[in-house]
Image: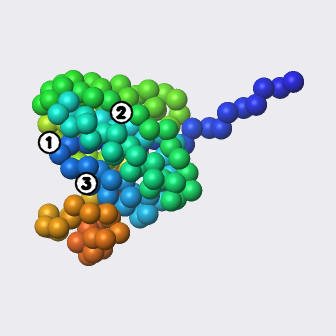
């Protein structure tokens, strides 16, 4: 008997959780709705003070994904507060492992604190990793946006893909 061949890996999504769980959840929803991404794996990377919100974010990701007809494997990585070197090492290692397994990797920086975002982007850049997307949900205001994505007027928000924007401008 020939053993079954596992399906080829698809997309993986690394999201940075900072102070706002809503920002993470709404950016994820926007990426699914506007960009059509359907990640097989989602990794939430957060600093120690925000780790308690990771389970809420993971559950929201599961619920939103189910609404789009799939359920990704969801994991969490916790890094020390304000340690950009450790955050960068963790995210670089995670992205490198996923790429090594054949995944196309996207990172969402919307909710991440500046120190974590900087550490992540510097580390993956120095390592020369092939990130397919760097997402950011741009909001025209921060007033009254701590609610579900679909309840925020579309004209107030825009999901940006920094990699796509960079490729479009020589």
Looking at the image, which is closer to me, 44 or 159?
44
SS for callout 2: strand
Circle nearer the N terminus (1, 2): 2
Circle nearer the N terminus (3, 2): 3
Looking at the image, which is closer to me, 83 or 168?
83
Check disc 1: other Cα within 10 Å, few if <14, some if 14-19, many if 20+.
some
Residue at mark 2: 76
Check disc 3: other Cα within 10 Å, few if <14, some if 14-19, many if 20+.
many
Q: Kindly indicate the quadrant of the structure image that contains residue 158.
A: bottom left
Left or right of 8 in this view: 165? left
Residue at point 38% right, 58% down? 29
**Position in image of residue 144 (x %, y %):** 17, 67
Residue at point 25% right, 36% down? 52
| Farthest-out residue, right | 1
Residue at mark 1: 114
Residue at mark 3: 23
């Amino acid at each position: 008997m020939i053993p079954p061949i596992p399906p080829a890996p698809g997309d993986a999504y690394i999201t940075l959780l900072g102070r706002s769980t809503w920002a993470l959840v709404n950016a994820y929803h926007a990426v699914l709705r506007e960009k059509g991404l359907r990640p097989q794996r989602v990794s939430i990377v957060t600093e120690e003070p925000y780790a308690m919100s990771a389970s809420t974010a993971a559950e929201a990701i599961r619920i939103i994904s189910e609404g789009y007809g799939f359920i990704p494997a969801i994991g969490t990585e916790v890094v020390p507060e304000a340690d950009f070197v450790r955050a960068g090492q963790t995210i670089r290692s995670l992205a490198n492992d996923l790429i090594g397994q054949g995944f196309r990797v996207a990172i969402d920086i919307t909710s991440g604190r500046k120190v974590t975002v900087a550490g992540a982007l510097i580390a993956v850049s120095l390592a020369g990793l092939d990130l397919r997307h760097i997402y950011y949900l741009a909001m025209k205001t921060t007033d009254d946006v701590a609610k579900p994505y679909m309840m925020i007027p579309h004209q107030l928000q825009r999901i940006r893909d920094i990699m796509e924007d960079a490729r479009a401008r020589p």
